[in-house]
Amino acid sequence: MGMSPKNVMNVAEKLYSAGFISYPRTETTRYDPNGFDARAMLRDHCNNPEWGRSASYLLRSRKSGKPPLRGKDAGDHPPITPLKSATRDQVGGGAAWRVYEFVVRNFLGSLHNDLLFTRTTASLALPNSSEADFELELVTVDSLGFADACRWVLRDIGATTSPGHKGNDDFIQEGQRLQITKASIEERKTRPPRFIQEHELIRLMDSNRIGTDASMAVHVSNIVDRGYVMLCDETGQPIRPPGPPGKRKNLPRQIGRYMIPTPLGSSLLGLFDHDATASNVDSPAMLSHPS
């Protein structure tokens, strides 16, 4: 969504106050099998211009109003769900719409079946070679499942063909000989691991039980606000501060929110004698954009 975790939480709380979504500060992901009526909620979204088709399909395919029995019950508030169907204009557009749409699409995805796909890997070997020298991969979607509502998942798995497309028929076959059309030699150097992103840090905090769902976003924001790291996109450019909607239509979209340690952050690690010493070396991406 191109937003900091703290900003997402702030926007979610405003959406909750306005009656668009349920209480966002929760760690529960399991629906109440007795008190949650999935069909009643789906009916409200069937006419939505953005995801009405997905909601209508779920309403037709789900014979029972009971939700799927998956997720965890943390004993606090119910999972985050939309409380009513709304359009971009009704929500207010901008950040509010991005968060609201994400909540709705995740809710619809949680009621779907699993995403099924086939990953085919071809190993290519040069003549007189005993081992594979190259690999070619094809990801074919067999059943969209929850990706019908959450289309970004297809990009995450590297899907190359859509359901119904017989991609394997056009794929190379075992034992097939291919003609080399071009050969060249390139000299490159290995690159260090990329810097961590904000959402990845929150995932690590959650897996190591550092903070709660309500406090983790604040901890990450404090690291940035206190100057221990700077936020950059995947090209190494600093993240632009948010501005009024419609004022930056000519600027390219920034992808990624990578946390790059500053000299202050590196020095702070030194005070604690951290064994994984951070350096002042810029990100490889930033080296192509010297200040």
Image (spheres, rainbow, N blue to C red):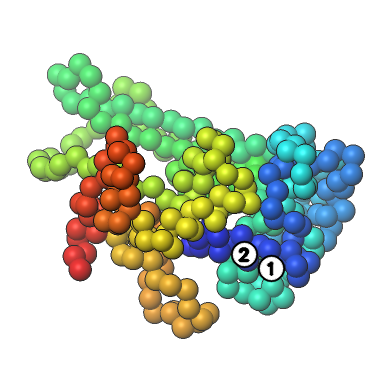
Instruction: Say which element carries label 2.
Output: helix
Residue 182 location, quadrant: top left
Query: Viewer-proximal residue, 69 or 108?
Result: 69
Give the residue drawn at x 35%, y 23%.
174
Residue placed under numbered mark 1 in the picture? 14
From the top left corner, tell me how far across and down residue 197 is, in percent. Answer: 42, 51
**Mark 1 belongs to which amino acid?**
Lys
- The residue nearer to you, when weighing 210 against 203, is 210
The relative height of residue 182 versus residue 253 in the rendered view (above or below) is above
CA distance for labels 1 and 2: 6 Å
Find disc 2 in the rendering and name its residue.
10
**As drawn, is 160 to the left or to the right of 37?**
left
Q: Is residue 231 left or right of residue 18?
A: left
Residue 285 visible at all:
no
Residue 219: image location, x then y, percent: 51, 53
**Do the residues under discs 1 and 2 have CB atoms within 8 angstroms?**
yes
SS class, disc 1: helix
Q: Amino acid at mark 2?
A: Asn
Residue 170, numbered circle: none
- Residue at image position (54%, 40%) is 210
Q: Position of residue 153 (x, y in %)?
A: 54, 47
Q: Position of residue 14 (x, y in %)?
A: 69, 68
Give the left or right position of residue 244, taking residue 256 as reference: right
